[in-house]
Amino acid sequence: MGSPWPPGVTSGETDAPLCFRRINNRKKHTERHRDASPAAVYTICMLREQPRADETLQGVQQALDSRVWEYDGVEVRNSNAGLGLFATRRFLPGEVIYSTGWLTVKGPVEDVELVAQTIVDGRITTVEVTAKHMVVFEDGRWLDVPGCFINHSCAPNMKSVFLDPSGSGQPSVFDYVALVELLPGDEITEDQTRFDWGDDGLEFECQCEAAGCYGLIDGFGGLPPNIQQQAGDTLSMEAKRRWALLGPQE
Ligand SMILES: [Zn+2]
């Protein structure tokens, strides 16, 4: 097993190596996609160096205003289920679709309406980001654009892998990783119950039609105990934190 980091970079270092890592990743993309913008990479790094500026709504909006939230290989599209995130190129199983940090919102969000620019159906478009796009984590909520438009499936084709490169015990970045081969035009889906506990009042009836569909989706906390028991070691973020506090129930 080789190190996932570039030579000379260890996971114990902080922000700068992450930027380095991301730029290295982007270089690989650049070889395949000549339109990839190095400026966009620089903006990501700069954004992450703003210390907690994203915690107020004003700070989050300023951060959202700082760039167009686009990544190679994905775009938001209108679909039967409203907006969703779609692959615009092929991804292999295990391939990172994109890698990012997230913005954290503190305080009440019920009536919040943020805006962000991303690619929708091939064009730079302003989209609304509301409480339903934010995931509860401890005393705040977090979001990334365009990942907040990824729809749920009980048989997902992608999972998010949270990384703690600083070793602080608090993940600071994550990768969206393809679980199966994705082709251009495929909708990217994730099982939201694996990171969301379900106390944000945003439950919904799932339409995914997968065998074993959970039906009502209300976070990991809303799943039947037998499914929770089987899935306890696949959790991240708030679902993992709360499951650890609760302990597996007999
Ligand atoms: Zn389902």
Image: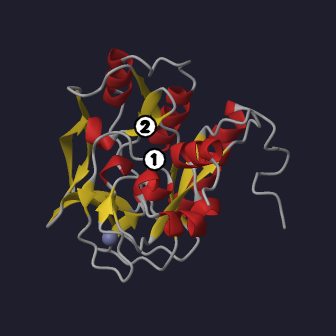
Image vertical order of residue 124 relative to residue 136, above or below:
below
| 77 lies left or right of 69 | left
Q: How is the image coloured?
A: secondary structure
Alpha carbon of mark 2 to alpha carbon of mark 1: how far? 8 Å
Front one among 40 and 229: 229
Which kind of residue does numbered mark 2 sit on? Val
> Answer yes or no: do the residues labelled 2 and 1 have beta carbons within 8 Å?
yes
Q: Quadrant of ligand 1?
A: bottom left
Image vertical order of residue 200 relative to residue 206, above or below:
above
State whether label 2 is within 8 Å of ligand 1: no
Front one among 90 and 59: 59
Quarter the N terminus occupies: bottom right
For disc 2, the marked residue is 136
Pointer 1 local density, CA inside 10 Å: few below 14, some 14–19, many at least 20:
many
Q: Which residue sits at x=67%, y=32%?
A: 15
Image vertical order of residue 176 relative to residue 38, above or below:
below
Q: Quadrant of residue 9?
A: top right
Q: Which residue sits at x=27%, y=79%?
A: 209
Image location of residue 99, percent across then percent down: 53, 51
For disc 1, the marked residue is 197
Counting residues from the start of the chain, the first of labels 2 and 1 encountered is 2
Q: Which residue sits at x=31%, y=42%?
A: 133
Pointer 2 local density, CA inside 10 Å: few below 14, some 14–19, many at least 20:
many
Q: Which residue sits at x=60%, y=54%?
A: 25
**Label disc, if present, on residue 62 of the rendered structure:** none
Image location of residue 219, percent across then percent down: 40, 52
Q: Nearer the viewer, mark 2 or mark 1?
A: 1
Image location of residue 168, percent across then percent down: 74, 32
